[in-house]
Amino acid sequence: MKISTFQQALAPVVACATALLLVVSPLAYADESQEIIKLYRQGNLPQALQRVDAYLASKPKDAQMLFQKGLILTEQNKIPEAIRIFSSLAADHPNLPEPYNNLAVLYASQGQYEKAKDALERAIRTHPSYSTAHENLGDIYAKMASQAYDKALQLDKSNAAAQTKLSLIKDLFTDGSKGVKIAVAKSASTPPAKAAEKVAEVAVEKPAPERLAAVEESSVKSPANSGSHEEIIKTVNDWAKSWSTKDVATYLSFYSKDFQTPGGVARSAWEKGRHERIEKPKSILVSISNPKVTIIDASHAKITFKQIYQSDSLKNNTIKTLVLIKAGDKWVIQKEHVGQ
């Protein structure tokens, strides 16, 4: 279920409400906004949140920064706090559909489908042509239907029709391309409304265990570098597997000694953060799809793929790129970032 970018949400506000115009220079604001987005994409959420809070300390009603804060809190799985942010935005800007849409995603992640449905209906009333909300509403209706079919089967286990319908809906939500999706900030210059980006997802059902299947290589390889391609694919598979099994020590061993940590933070601080984020969820599933391998030279390579992350409370679909170097007889990660 897609959650809208703050650029989409703020376009009509900037046009219609001078109260939201920035007192600082547009250039300074754009630089700060871009830096926060960069930190967010790098996974450096604490620092991104710190900078947002610093900005909001002097401008507590700045809608764009509040939107960013809501997205960061969602990524940190601080759902009640994120709900408060988007509820406040919806109350202050009732003509914007995006805060309602984002509330629906958060409600859905908690199993509150009736609230999610109501929020999406409000989004559609404010913007009838908002396709994101229509698609998300369809997902919510499907989930609510699955609950009704499940109840029917509890009352009558011989109800074959209900069983068939329930199976069809479950198939829908175990398809990695389906589920309630949340779109996040792209850049401060993103055009409004039509530039929605499917970056992250909050799922209403856990994916099937087979989501952990081995990576299928999609890049074209020559005989000269086919061995390296296979080694890199195996490396990424094993990296994802160690993450999924919460084997933190093995997971960290896939990173080179000179790994470029997000935002240039100390290696020890980055490792501590990864320990906390991997150990906190009760369960994690990570799968990789559509990888594209580029061999730079005998000891340098790059791989871009779709990373599908699923914990007991959050599902995240992102495009990720890893830059790898050859260390002895193995490939290790020197740099990683979200995007191509």
Image: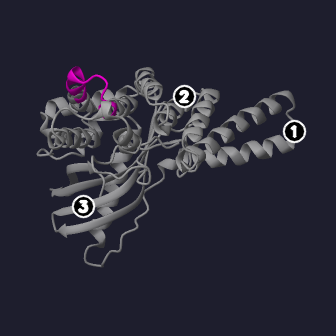
Report the residue marked by disc 2.
107
**Camera-side mark, 3 or 2:** 2
Q: Is residue 53 magenta?
A: yes
**Disc 1 residue type?**
Asn
Question: Residue at the spot x=22%, y=20% of the render?
Answer: 57
Of residues 199 and 230, the one nearer the viewer is 199
User: Going from the N terminus, do you reach mark 2 or mark 1 first?
Assistant: 2
Q: How is the image coloured?
A: one colour
Q: Which percent across, then down, holds residue 233?
A: 34, 59
The residue at which mark 1 appears reads as: 159
Badge 1: residue crowd in 10 Å (few <14, some 14–19, many ≥20): few
Indicate which disc residue 287 carries: none
> Do the residues bearing badges 2 and 1 touch, measured as CB atoms within 8 Å?
no
List x then y, in percent, for residue 59: 24, 24
| x 28%, y 55%: residue | 321
Image quadrant where residue 165 sits: top right
User: Judging from the image, what secondary structure is the residue with disc 2 in?
Assistant: helix
Can residue 205 be seen in this snapshot? no
The reply, left or right, for residue 41 in relation to residue 123 is: left
CA–CA distance in space, label 3 to label 1: 52 Å
* Three-letter code, disc 3: Lys
Quarter of the view holding residue 5: top left
Q: Point out the stretch of residues depicted in magenta.
A: 52-65
**Neighbourhood count class around disc 3 (C-alpha, 10 Å): few under 14, some 14–19, many 20 upward:** some
Q: Looking at the magenta stretch, what is its main secondary structure?
A: helix
Label 3–label 2 contact, CB within 8 A = no
| The C terminus - image quarter | bottom left
Q: CA distance from mark 2 to mark 1?
A: 30 Å
Reading the image, the residue beneath label 3 is 302
- On whether residue 102 falls in the magenta region, the answer is no
Q: Is residue 256 above or below residue 57?
A: below
